Amino acid sequence: MVAKSGYEKCAHLYDLFDTTENIEFFLRYGCEAGEVLDIGAGTGRIAIPLAERGVKVFCVEPSPAMRREFEKKLSALPEVSKNIELVAGDATSFKFPRTFPAAFLSGIFDHFLDDQERFSSLSNIAKHLETHGKLIFEVGLGYMKDSPMSPAGKVTQGDKEYRRFTEGKVLPEEKMEWLLVYEIYQSGKLAEKIEERSLAGIIDHPKLHRLLKETGFEIKREFGGYDFKEYKDGDLLLIIEAEKR
Ligand SMILES: C[S@@+](CC[C@H](N)C(=O)[O-])C[C@H]1O[C@@H](n2cnc3c(N)ncnc32)[C@H](O)[C@@H]1O
């Protein structure tokens, strides 16, 4: 069976490839809010730079391997870790006994597989936001199609070279399967190959609008990139700034 979201085998490689592209974008919202709920916080790629700027970050992360990577980084950053609380949990069911001025879902909305999961995640997040609190998240609307295995990054560190490849396959019932392949070369020779499969849910723009409305959100802005350019039909990425009504 394909894991719902596949990070257990490759969490230690996550930061190598998924680096800084959207950090500045989220920092702008986080610094304005002062406190942030970071759901699906992963390895702390966004939470740590936020905490370094004095923002309090409350992180929820279901994957033990991703939390381990996050905790490893925090153990080397005792001052920064005072601004971070990391809990095991899932978007549908996490609980904090308070509300927040902002919530981030960076790279996780596509992991919600159906409307039931999207609805309960968005409702739970709305419960944890102050009135006018902001929800910022992206949806890979333009990525939800078959795509052949192709290179998705190459990183060299000393005598090691890390290569990543991805393949996407549309499945029945508005789902997709992603295959990530990592090849690790040592002194030019293939030393290790890791394959990780995961599932994603396919959603369209009108349905996303309906779900946000039903769960108590108002859409404020829609961007088509992390440079804050306005979204237009056909853009690969849709980034939403919504507000809790
Ligand atoms: C692409 S990573 C993004 C990590 C981090 N937000 C970042 O931007 O670097 C997606 C993360 O979402 C987490 N995730 C997947 N399904 C989730 C769910 N239902 N609730 C909360 N987190 C989830 C995964 O374990 C993974 O750490």
Image (tube, rainbow, N blue to C red):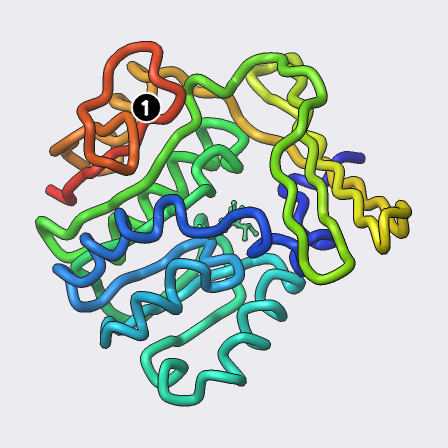
Q: The disc labelled 1 sits on which kind of residue?
A: Leu
Give the percent coordinates (x, y) of residue 16.
59, 54
- The CB of the residue at mark 1 lies under 8 Å from ligand 1: no
Give the percent coordinates (x, y) of residue 164.
69, 39
Q: Would you name the residue on which mark 1 appears? A: 208
Residue displayed at 9% across by 49% down: 132
Examine the rendered structure and indicate whether residue 141 appears above or below residue 159: above
Q: Quadrant of the N terminus?
A: top right
Give the percent coordinates (x, y) of residue 53.
24, 72
Q: Quadrant of the C terminus?
A: top left
Q: Quadrant of residue 78?
A: bottom left
Residue displayed at 50% across by 54% down: 90
> In the picture provided, is 233 more to the left or to the right than 77?
left
> In the picture provided, is 165 more to the left or to the right than 76?
right
Give the percent coordinates (x, y) of residue 136.
27, 44
Residue displayed at 79% across by 40% down: 195
Local secondary structure at mark 1: helix
> In the picture provided, is 103 more to the left or to the right than 40?
left
Q: Nearer the viewer, residue 76 or 214?
A: 76
Examine the rendered structure and indicate whether residue 179 appears above or below residue 43: above
